[in-house]
Image (spheres, grey):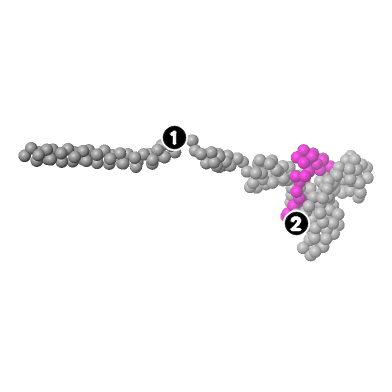
Amino acid sequence: MRSTRARTLAVATVAAGLLAGGITAGTTDAFTADKPSDTIANTAAGQPKNPSQAQGETAANTAATLPDEGALSGRTTYYLKFDKNTVTNSRLSLMQSVVGPDRVVKSYKAGSGVIEDPCASNAGWLPNGDYKIEFHRKNFVGKINGYVIKVSDKRCHNNTKRDALFIHSEMKSNGNQGTAETKKWTTNNPNDYASWGCIKLNPSNIKDLFNKMDSVGWEKLTKLKVIS
């Protein structure tokens, strides 16, 4: 009897120990299994990112806040636009190329030709289209003198070549007014806005145009655009 009680007590003691051990082991396993994910989450939320990740995010944020390349480089370009109305009453405008509608910097009264035929050599106004700017001078000497802008040749719709094309006025080679008709500006008898095909401005306006381009840089003047 005494041995039976001893065995029963021993079994009960072992069982209690196993039960206690199982609960302890299960709790420890569950805690251990959750700990790595909790640690990663807490580290990601509260600790610095690795250097490559931080650099990548810094570059992305910087790129998002920088202005575009054109704005950074400060590149600004200009062109001349000749809008034909009549041979002695049209407009030559200095335009600034911008995003959206281009900006008119200054617009001047101008003339071109003696007839409205773009294919009439040495008589008609200029054909529509784009012209290259070849050179500019303030002291040109020739059939025209003084302030001039030379533009490229152009073929009109019937393939007639228009050449010797300038933007000019009437003055002496030093920019002053002379006494000969071709070297002094008049607005009637004759109307000096008329020309043999070139574009003409009065002396003060062509000098104003030169002053504006001198200030921004002639290398930024890209073309002459003729429209109607």
In depth, the one of 131 and 53 nearer the eye is: 53
Residue bearing the label numbered 2: 128
Q: Secondary structure at mark 1?
A: helix
Q: Identity of the amino acid at label 2? A: Asn
The disc placed on residue 46 is 1
In depth, the one of 42 and 152 nearer the eye is: 42
The disc placed on residue 99 is none
Residue at image position (89%, 43%) is 139
Q: Identity of the amino acid at label 1? A: Gly
Residue at image position (70%, 43%) is 75
- Position of residue 156 relative to residue 150, above or below, is below
Q: Which residues are magenta?
A: 203-228
Residue at image position (76%, 51%) is 224
The percent coordinates of residue 182 (x first, y second) are 90, 47
Residue at image position (72%, 42%) is 105
Main SS of the magenta part reads helix
